[in-house]
């Protein structure tokens, strides 16, 4: 049975006594609550459940006035026929008072639901939808008429409500699948916000100007046109404009006093609230102030346009000084990495709510959200709005009575199986209908130096087989804190090391001492490769990471053969911490290390501590040909073209023989970061690929005999003093 949830309920996040007291006096303030590290989206002063959605804690309103539909599910409310005929508030004022009296409460309730959200019973469970979601379901016209309720969209709108209420946040970066409804939901929110705003600007961008225009004319305008009169502002210009919606008089909450006002349209000042679109470009909306920017298909911006450059510009349109005055609703599937996907990936990853600066903001200012395709795939949603994950015993009815006979997971797996011989087609399917973020940013195979088919086969297998159960995070320490004694491994979820195999106790910490120098005792079992660094800090505070990879050889010991057993990709606060981490790993496993000697501090660290014997000399030269430095510390340079090519060839050979599916079994390479590094590896820009450098060196270290120089044999004639004769004729003659 498929098991996954888009959110977690945190029942004890707020202590019951505090919750009860604050709710009693309606003391919960809308926005970010620092004391409880949660975002309150309730506008009633009372909260109920606290959701955690993609690491963002969100306090929902307390349930009240829970509506029960006859069919136990969302059902749009009927719009009274008498009100349908009324087009503007000024038409309304012409009706007799007794007529209007019948609908005051109806109109007031719609404004309340728009502001506070709506509670109803869905499949016997009290369910909350935000005001924006209610407006989308009840009052937005899309290409199929009225939208259906989907649980995935409920979570989307709750997350968006949190982005709106959090003063630290510029909006959301939503990674989606095709046909998820984002364009319509974003268009609905654009109209919803614009029709209650004064003196405000709303903008739309997409992967091209034509796409932005189409979104405006085919989605935004129809939604606006079909709003009921009591939500619809007085509009300037054409009923169905092509470039700009201009709301002259934004609608405000109806009261008996405002409804009975005798103001006329011509007497009211223009309030300049507009919705428009711009052509795609880095400087679109530069210098303007926006209350909402809808960013559609942001993962498909291709050269010369750059979504990162555009966001740097448009981000400034959403703030005054340090105060955020507008929000961005950004959503997209991803193109291939070299077709706009790479920049969107960077933007999405820089929107992680767990990674904030001192001001409490993410690097981008946005909050990232990913909803797997199985939650929001058209045709596999039941009548209650929930996905049909598993194939049912008997057909399940969809929203319109269509039977659903197989589960969405089985459907997806069938599609994947059918595309396994077409790697680029498979990668495109993954990007369009991703079940993980790795699927969403899957690249085209033609750009890779290595066999992407095998790499992605392994990545997918690891995810399905839950490689987390095989991989253990942890740390190495000197026993009792005494250096140069024994090293012990401690599992720790925050540890910098990931390991899949630990040698038996009798093979741990094995070394040999020769002339006061320690040599590894398990060199016959495997070796390490390392991409080091020399400088603790960098100008930008980041710098490349240090990487260490451990690989076994075939041996008679109790160890898996040709198996990557250790991955370390980190940049501790000081270089010395990194050097010690590497040293402890080598000592624990008793295996040597092949490291780049153009960044020599690591190797000098080994030598200074008496572990020079652990550092492998470059295998492509005999000892007599080594430089003075190479004899002193060992290691291998990374500048030689011969070494660069040999390094890449080593990885290529390993992938072909030990990664992916061979027709019978999958490989046992479980380190996803290294696999992804191989997938993206660029031999012309090697410095960015720390894991590839270290893993390639580990492969070379385990197969160093392949790279040993071959001595050319010079054949010379040796004179043994034996004379040779020509015996033709009557007399023998000496051959000179």
Image (cartoon, rainbow, N blue to C red):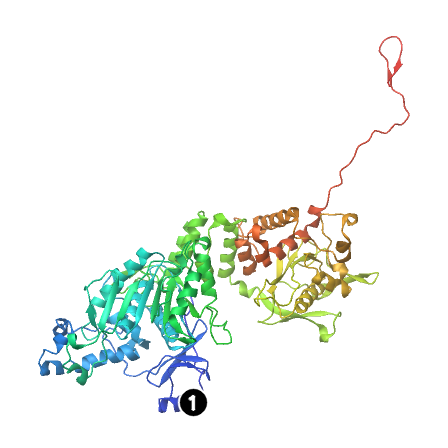
- Where on the picture, by quarter, is residue 729? top right
> Which residue shows up at 82% across the image and 31% down it?
716
Percent from the top left, x then y, of residue 40?
39, 80
Q: Position of residue 551 (x, y in %)?
A: 64, 57
Which residue is outermost to the left? 96
Q: How many marks?
A: 1
State whether residue 338 is above or below residue 86: above
Q: Secondary structure at mark 1?
A: helix
Which residue is at the far right? 721
Direction from residue 253 to residue 161 in the image, left or right: right
Please rate how many residues cluster around mark 1, counting C-alpha atoms within 10 Å: few if below 14, some from 14 to 19, many from 20: few
Q: Nearer the viewer, residue 680 or 374?
A: 680
108 or 656: nearer the viewer: 108
Q: Residue furthest top?
A: 730
Image quadrant occupied by the N terminus: bottom left
Residue bearing the label numbered 1? 18
Q: Is residue 204 left or right of residue 478?
A: left
Q: Which quadrant of the structure image shows residue 487?
A: bottom right
Question: Residue 15: horizontal and vertical position, in percent?
Answer: 45, 87
- Does any portion of residue 149 appear in the rendered image? no
Residue 363 visible, this angle = yes
Q: Give the side of residue 39 with respect to residue 478, left or right.
A: left
Judged left or right of residue 5, residue 198 is left
Q: Position of residue 196 (x, y in %)?
A: 26, 75
Residue that appears at 19% across and 65% down: 237
Q: Is residue 146 above or below residue 461?
A: below
Quadrant assignment for the C terminus: top right
* Occupied quadrant, residue 609: bottom right
Give above or below for 262 relative to 248. below
């Amino acid at each position: 049975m498929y098991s996954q949830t888009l959110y977690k309920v945190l029942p004890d996040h707020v202590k019951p006594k505090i919750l009860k007291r604050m709710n009693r006096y309606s003391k919960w303030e809308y926005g970010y609550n620092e004391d409880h590290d949660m975002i309150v989206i309730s506008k009633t002063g009372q909260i109920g459940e606290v959701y955690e959605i993609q690491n963002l804690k969100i306090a929902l309103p307390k349930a009240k006035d829970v509506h029960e539909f006859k069919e136990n599910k969302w059902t749009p409310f009927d719009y009274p026929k008498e009100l349908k005929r009324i087009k503007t508030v000024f038409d309304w004022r012409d009706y007799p008072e007794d007529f209007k009296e019948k609908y005051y409460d109806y109109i007031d309730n719609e404004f309340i639901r728009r502001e506070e959200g709506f509670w109803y019973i869905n499949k016997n469970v009290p369910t909350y939808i935000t005001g924006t979601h209610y407006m989308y379901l009840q009052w937005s016209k899309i290409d199929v008429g009225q939208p259906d309720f989907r649980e995935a969209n409920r979570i989307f709108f709750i997350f968006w409500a949190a982005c709106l209420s959090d003063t630290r946040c510029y909006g959301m970066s939503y990674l989606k699948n095709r046909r998820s409804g984002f364009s319509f939901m974003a268009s609905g929110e654009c109209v919803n916000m614009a029709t209650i705003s004064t003196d405000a600007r709303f903008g739309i961008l997409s992967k091209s100007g034509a796409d932005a225009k189409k979104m405006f004319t085919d989605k935004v305008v129809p939604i606006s046109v079909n709003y009921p009169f009591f939500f619809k502002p007085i509009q300037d210009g054409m009923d169905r404009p092509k470039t700009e919606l201009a709301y002259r008089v934004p609608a405000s909450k109806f009261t008996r006093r405002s409804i009975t006002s005798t103001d006329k349209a011509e007497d009211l000042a223009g309030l300049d609230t507009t919705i428009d679109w711009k052509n795609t470009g880095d400087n679109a909306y530069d210098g303007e102030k926006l209350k909402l920017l809808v960013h559609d298909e942001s993962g498909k911006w291709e050269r010369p346009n750059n979504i990162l450059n555009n966001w740097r510009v448009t981000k400034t349109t959403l703030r005054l000084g340090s105060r955020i005055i507008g929000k961005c609703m950004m959503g997209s599937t991803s193109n291939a990495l070299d077709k706009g996907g790479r920049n969107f990936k960077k933007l999405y990853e820089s929107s992680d709510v767990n990674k904030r600066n001192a001001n409490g903001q993410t690097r981008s200012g946005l909050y990232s959200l990913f909803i797997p395709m199985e939650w929001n795939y058209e045709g596999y949603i039941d009548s209650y709005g929930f996905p049909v994950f598993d194939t049912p015993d008997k057909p399940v009815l969809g929203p319109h009575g269509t039977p659903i006979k197989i589960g969405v997971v089985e459907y997806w797996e069938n599609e994947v199986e059918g595309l396994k011989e077409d790697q680029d087609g498979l990668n495109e399917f993954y990007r369009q209908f991703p079940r993980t973020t790795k699927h969403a940013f899957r690249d085209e195979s033609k750009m890779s130096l290595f066999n992407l088919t095998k790499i992605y086969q392994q990545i997918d297998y690891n995810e399905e087989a839950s490689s987390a159960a095989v991989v253990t995070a942890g740390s190495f320490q000197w026993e009792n804190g005494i250096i140069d004694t024994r090293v012990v491994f401690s599992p720790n979820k925050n540890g910098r090391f990931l390991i899949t195999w630990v040698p038996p106790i009798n093979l741990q910490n094995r070394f040999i001492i020769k002339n006061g120098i320690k040599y590894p005792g398990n060199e016959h079992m495997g070796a390490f490769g390392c991409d080091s660094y020399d400088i603790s800090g960098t100008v930008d505070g980041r710098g490349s990471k240090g990487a260490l990879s451990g690989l076994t050889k075939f041996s008679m010991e109790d160890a898996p053969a040709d198996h990557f057993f250790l991955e370390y990709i980190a940049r501790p606060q000081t270089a010395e911490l990194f050097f010690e981490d590497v040293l402890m790993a080598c000592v624990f496993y008793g295996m040597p290390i092949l490291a780049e000697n153009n960044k020599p501090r690591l190797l000098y660290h080994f030598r200074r501590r008496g572990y020079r014997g652990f550092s492998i000399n470059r295998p492509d030269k005999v000892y007599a040909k080594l430089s003075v430095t190479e004899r002193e510390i060992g290691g291998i340079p990374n500048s030689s073209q011969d070494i660069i090519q040999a390094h890449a060839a080593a990885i290529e050979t390993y992938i072909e023989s030990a990664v992916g599916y061979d027709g019978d079994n999958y490989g046992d390479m479980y380190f996803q970061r290294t696999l992804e590094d191989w997938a993206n590896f660029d031999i012309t820009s090697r410095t960015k690929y720390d894991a590839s450098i270290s893993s390639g060196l580990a492969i070379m270290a385990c197969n160093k005999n392949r790279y040993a120089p071959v001595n050319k044999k010079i054949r010379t004639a040796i004179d043994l003093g034996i004379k040779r004769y020509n015996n033709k004729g009557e007399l023998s003659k000496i051959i000179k």
